[in-house]
Amino acid sequence: MKFSPLCLLPLFAVSLSAAEPVDYLRDIKPVIQAACVKCHGKLTQKSDLKLDTAAAAIAGGVSGPSIVPGKSAESIFIQTIEGKHDYVPKMPYKRPPLDAAQVALLKRWIDEGAKAPADEQPSDDRHWAFIAPKKAPLPDVGVKHPIDAFVVARLKQDKLELSSPAAKHTLIRRLYLDLLGLPPTPAQVAAFVADDSPQAWERAVDQVLESPHYGERWGRWWLDQARYADSNGYSIDAPRQIWKYRDWVVSALNRDLPFDQFTVEQLAGDLLADATEPQKIATGFHRNTQINQEGGIDPEQFRIESVIDRVGTTGTVWLGLTIACAQCHDHKFDPISHKEYYQLFAFFNNQSEPTLRVIDGDVDPKEVDAEIKELEQKLKAYFKKYADDYAKWEEELGPMSRSLFTPEATKAIAIEKKKRSFEHTRALFQVGPGAADQDYRAINERYLELVALQKGGVTTMVMEEMKQPRKTTIFLKGDFTRPDAEVTEGVPAVLPPLKTEKRPNRLQLANWLVTAENPLTARVIVNRVWQQYFGRGLVETENDFGTMGSPPTHPELLDWLAVDFRDNGWSLKKLHKLIVTSDTYRQSSTVTPQSRGLVVDPKNYLLWRQTRLRLDAEIVRDVSLAASGLLAEKQGGPPVYPPIPEGVLGLGQVKRPWPLSKGDDRYRRGLYTFVFRATPPPSLSVFDAPEGFSTCTRRIRSNTPLQALSLLNDAAHFEFAQSLEKVIQKDGLVVAFERCVSRPPTMQEKELLSKLDTLSQARVLLNLDETITRE
């Protein structure tokens, strides 16, 4: 979905009271900047008209003054915006029109005299997102926290205030759900509520950030963007093994791997000097593309489809740009050419797509390989030492002796001596005269142990650079059967240049994305983190920072956070702590009919309250598991198969098995549930989990009857209710209630619930709106 860049500008000012004069810098200039200066600014002045200052707009161009102060009806500026001029077409030209409220505000400003600062300077003609962010001084509004300073300063313009802090039990539940994706236990709630020290909140934040569950909760956030799933997609949708990448993400986030390094390892870990196994596993980010296994396909077509996906995903995830729009032609709105698209394409066109065998556990596979080779040499020395004895022994072997051989030795002795491999010789040595040598036996046992360890590993999908790069050409109209001019690797000219003395590769691209000069990456990531806490980013179109995207509601705050994120070593944990320790985050989400914000800013763009957010699909499951006492806290490893409804896996082209997990695996977090792209678990789909077909930078939050029916009747949720019933029977209704919503029930709630049997009580508690909502 596309949004007009004008849809939010003077979003707040349109509700000004009639008595309050229009503020040019706050209410008018942002509209003109977004809608007009691309064609009427410093670099381009169509019809000799500049609109980058009020004075220039009043002076006008070839048609005379554009604005007549005090007379909006006579102003060409208004006539063209409304499409009422005799020969000038409606403006903005070939772009979405301004809405009625914005036009009304512009007319009102002109009728009030078109007042503007006399010393106004022309603004930069470039779109705001292509200008490097800078830290503005904190507004002097009497608050110390930088986030609160910017938010309060903006609220004061509309005579609003932050809402009062949320209740302590609400705050601690909010913190646990936001950072861990799990509710606090009643004991954790009680301890925080009882702690009246000034350091209580910061201490709670630090404790939560150290939890290993942090990586699971925020790992799912990143896996959405990585379009992670456990199958190949398309109609056959065969299972794939790439869960090692998922575990790498969780581990990296728990270690607070700096986001710049987090970026480099995923895009180009294989190209790092002495790349480690985890760094190679990280390149699974771009192996999450779909794989078509249908008969009769052109493999090259679908290889190119994967490269196209990688270009678009990289542009969306790190740059927040709709680069994919330039696949077939120059971008219609942003300064990204068709050629530049294929220059980016070239970075991802030079890889093979192997699988990497990974040894489980804390074992370095390089060390295992080295020791195996060392042991092979020692065993060969024994073979040489006993060579004459074995030659004589083999000549004298009779049928009875041969009948006692192992299958491996029987197979080996049938092979001509000069054609026997190392393993053939070793198999015979096991039953021959040298086998009794005590030193040999110890070496052989260690060799067998390491070989078994090596073979017992799992595979994961990775990227690997080709020694000889492929030729990359522009595809006419995006059609791979119509190659045109050859191109080499490069980045869009609107962004800082990629500095390298030789032909760049993915590693240089990854490093370029996180350079201090790049104006987008830090902003995009900070905005996407902010979105998780408030339901909406400071830039609402979190996947489009281009000219068709929404402008930031708090531009100075966005830039301050972006620079601070970068200057603090790209630490996500520091960014999380900064946000959750603000009063803005800790506000109540409660709204009363008397709230002035409902009139001035009904959609809460100004952040005068917190936002109630329905939990993500996996966390709905996790909360129920934790509340019912069934949660298995094991981390990592192969995906699991919790109960799903009958017949689900018969909906695709191929009916896939679902080997129902037993024991603790049945109660693992939703993050670990196996997901077929074509037929995902319904309990995840119904709560809007992405399938993994393409990158997802913002989950939708629907509200449907199917959600309530799933919580009541889904086999897994019914099992959770049965377990919660046991909690009620053992510890009482109040404890079960607190496990679900982190607060005690009111008298009325207890009276209502007491009319139900214990199983019904449990089912109601797990189906409460409050249970599946972060207040």
Image (cartoon, helix red, strand yellow):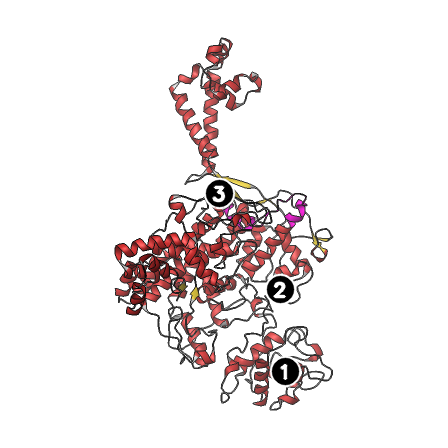
- The label on residue 453 is none
Q: Using the image, determine if residue 293 lies above or below residue 430.
A: below
Q: Secondary structure at mark 1?
A: helix
Q: Position of residue 648 (x, y in %)?
A: 51, 50
Which residue is found at the position 29% from the left and 57% from the top?
A: 728
Q: Is residue 227 magenta?
A: no
Which comes sooner in the sequence, label 3 or label 1? 1
Looking at the image, residue 496 sits to the left or right of residue 726; the answer is right
Q: Using the image, determine if residue 629 lies above or below residue 533.
A: above
Q: Disc 2 marks which residue? A: 494
Q: Quadrant of the C terminus?
A: bottom left
Question: Callout 1: 10 Å neighbours few (<14), some, many (20+)?
Answer: some
Q: Is residue 302 magenta?
A: yes
- Calculate the distance from the C-alpha at mark 3 to the C-alpha at mark 1: 60 Å
Question: Callout 2: 10 Å neighbours few (<14), some, many (20+)?
Answer: few
Q: Secondary structure at mark 3?
A: helix
Q: Disc 1 marks which residue? A: 56
Question: Callout 3: 10 Å neighbours few (<14), some, many (20+)?
Answer: some
Which comes sooner in the sequence, label 1 or label 2? 1
The answer to which quarter of the image holds residue 477 is: bottom right
Which comes sooner in the sequence, label 2 or label 3? 3
Instruction: Say what amino acid the circle numbered 3 marks.
Output: Glu
Q: Using the image, determine if residue 457 lies above or below residue 611.
A: above
Q: Magenta segment range?
A: 275-304
Please say if the residues under marks 1 and 2 sit with CB atoms less than 8 Å apart. no
Looking at the image, residue 106 sits to the left or right of residue 660; the answer is right
Q: Disc 3 marks which residue? A: 277
- Calculate the distance from the C-alpha at mark 2 to the C-alpha at mark 3: 36 Å
